[in-house]
Structures are given as C-alpha cells and as structure tokens.
Amino acid sequence: MTGLDTLRSAWHGINANLLRSGLTVLGLMIGVSAVIILLAVGTGSSAAVASRINALGTNTITVLSTGRFGRGPSTGGTQVRTANLTTQSVQAIEQHSQAPDVASVSPVVTTSETATYGSASYSTSVTGTTPDYLAAQDYTVSAGSTITQADVTSRKRVALIGQTVASNLFSTGQNALGQTIRLGSASFEIIGVLAAKGSSGGSTNQDSVVIAPYTAVQDELTGYAPFTELLVQAKSTASLNSAATEVENILAAETDTTVANLPFSVINEGTLLTTAQSTSSTFTTLLGAVAAISLLVGGIGVMNIMLVNVTERTREIGIRKAVGAPKSAILAQFLAEAVLLSLIGGGGGVLFGLIGTRFKIEGVTPVLAGYSIPLAFGIAICVGVFFGLYPANRAASLRPIDALRYE
C-alpha cells in the first residue's frame, strides 16, 4: 500500500462521518487559535507596559521626599526631623566627583492651576523645572523654543505648553507662540509648544502640562516650598544602578543618616521596566498554558473519534488483515487519519488566530508573536500523532479471526 493510498484511505475515513470529524477539527481549531491569540495578547500587554515606562525614561531616577524621619526622646514622646529636597541637594548630586554616573539633575515643583486665555480656560498640571527635564522626560518642542538656564536664573515668566493645553486654549490654526496666558493670577508668555506624547501609566495625559522655570513657578504659584521631586538622568542605561547608588549615598550624607533609613524614595525606572517585563512574561506564559489546555482537550477529541472509528471498522480491519495487509499498513492508515484531522484543525486554527489578533481585546492591542504560529501548529500535529497512536496501534494489533467475528 503506497503513501498515496494511505492518505486516500484516511480521507475516506474522515468523510465517512463528516459531523463527527468536523467537531473534532473544530476542537483543534479552537485550541490552536487560542494559543496564537492569547500569546499575542500577552505580548501586546507586555509591549504596552514597556512603552509606558519608556515614556517616563528608562535611564532616569526619581527622588521623592517621604517627609519626616528619625526617632528619639522629646517632650512630645517622639522626636522627628523633616527632610526636604533643596537646591543644596541638586548641587551635591551635580558634582561629578561625587556622582560620576549622573548626567543631569532636574529639580521639580508641581501644582495644578487653571490656565486661561481670553474666554477659554483649562485645568492643567504646571511643572516648574530646568531645561534638562525635557530631555530626561523625552519631551521635544514642536514649535517655538525651549526654556533656558538663563530663564531659570532670571526667574522669567515663560512657559511651554502641551498639545492638549494648546487645543483647549486656542482655536484651530491660531498661533500660540508669543501669547500670554494666565496660570491662576500669574501671567506667563508661551515660548514653545511641546510635541504630542500621549498618555502614560494608563490614564495620565502627558500632553496636559505647562512647563516653566521652577524659579518663576515658586515666585508666582507655589511659594518657596521644597522641591516635589528630583529627576536624575544617568549617563546611560548601563550606569543607571551606579547612578542610583551615588544619589542615595549623597542624600544619606546630606541628611546624616544611612541609605537604609533614607527619608526619600529613590525610584529606578530601569528596575521598574525589568520588573514589569518579568511580570508580563509570567502573564504571557500563563495565557499560553491556558490555551495549551484547550489543545489537550482537542487531542482527547482526536483519540475519542479514532477509538470509535476502530470499533466501527473492526470487520474492515479483519478483512484487510485476512487478505494479507501487514500490521504496519493498518497502523499507518489510522495514524494518517489522526494526523490529517490535526493538519486540517491546525491550519484552520492558524487562520482564525491571525484574524483574531487584529482586534483589540479588553483594551489591549494584540501583538503577534512570530513563534506562536509554528508552535501552535506543531503542537497540533504532535497532538494528532500522540493521541492517534494508541487507537491506530489497537487497530493494527487486532487478530483477524476476532475482527471477522465482531458484530
């Protein structure tokens, strides 16, 4: 019996009961498409998280004040000290001898104000900082010019506005450059419009922002309060951990404490990215495992239909063996039938999987993982071989006399 005869016989066996064969193929299609789609969802989720963290800057360190620290006897029972981020903190970190891996330090003061221009108004976040902040946060100016160190030193009332602020205060086609807006009761001249950045962290609109020299913001809006945070940019992603250690040591010496008791939160964005990627990888693996279970169920369906086929065709097997068909021919016939079912189911599953990855799922845009197609299709074939081998071997092992006697 040639290979073509074996395939023809396998195809005839599948066509003998199209409904039963179709349901088996459907089970495999669901399993294969589930593997492709769920792995794409996991990959897309991972890419979205990485993109959001990258928008914050993967070679940046954020220093936040946690307020008070220290304990000791006092008339009130507990003695605490207040730790603030000040210009002295900035100057210490900027010293190359103390922090050789630090590229720049940007002090930040933030507040929320209502921006008004003419009859238009918009509630926005106001960030007071230095020019280095823009590069550290990956902001670029699409029109006009950026703030300069001279603006900071001279406490100049100038500002950069995000695209959302511009669209809410100015009509389409209107030039915002050179216009004066009011932030609360203070007036600031617009010298630049920032390029669009979109959202970060899921809900934070990075285009709803006004950036101005921190000295002007302190003069007009916040008063001389300590900095809200320090944004430190490392010289490279590779030196990020070293830069974070240098910052911690400087701040610990400045506050006369240890790194372990540091009254500041030092957030390493690179560590956040690594953690997020690890979590996303686990999530993707879990989704793949869930999808693999559906493939396993499809394999059980293959075994079930093949066992039924062997039972229904026992007399046929007996006749074939009685006229001289070897065990290998019977084994090949039923194994080919199982593999053919898997091929059809796998091919259909790949097609539906590719279609499924073109739609958003729970807000996540799936990203097709290149390895998922050969993986899912290969597993489908292996399922056909594995679950078809036992029924095929059972058919091949029947004694001709018993098979001919079967009713």
Image: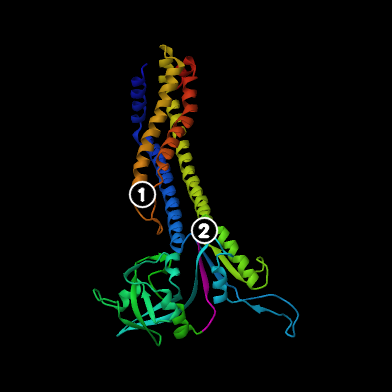
Query: Would residue 232 be counted in the magenta stretch?
Result: yes
> Helix, strand, or loop for circle 2?
helix
Q: Is residue 225 above or below residue 257?
A: below
Residue type at the position of mark 1: Gly
Q: Is residue 213 above or below residue 364?
A: below
Residue 214 coordinates in the image, percent (x, y): 46, 78
Given residues 182 and 323, the one toward you in this image is 182
Query: Would residue 120 be counted in the magenta stretch?
Result: no
Query: Which quadrant holds residue 171?
Result: bottom left
Q: Is residue 125 visible?
A: no
Q: Residue furthest bottom?
A: 185
> In this rendering, would 181 be left or right of 309?
left
Circle 1 Cα neighbour tier, 10 Å, few/some/many (<14 / 14–19 / ≥20): some
Q: On the rendered image, what quadrant is the C terminus found in?
A: top left
Residue found 64% across the figure and 69% down from its top? 252
Residue type at the position of mark 2: Gly
Q: On the rendered image, what quadrant is the N terminus found in?
A: top left
- The residue singled out by tag 1 in the image is 356
Precedes in sequence: disc 1 or disc 2: 2
Q: CA distance from mark 1 to mark 2?
A: 33 Å
The label on residue 335 is none
Which marked residue is nearer to the observer: mark 1 or mark 2? 2
> Helix, strand, or loop for circle 1?
helix
Given residues 272 and 210, the one toward you in this image is 210
- The residue singled out by tag 2 in the image is 270
Magenta segment range? Answer: 224-234
Residue 388 coordinates in the image, percent (x, y): 46, 29
Query: Which quadrant holds residue 212?
Result: bottom left
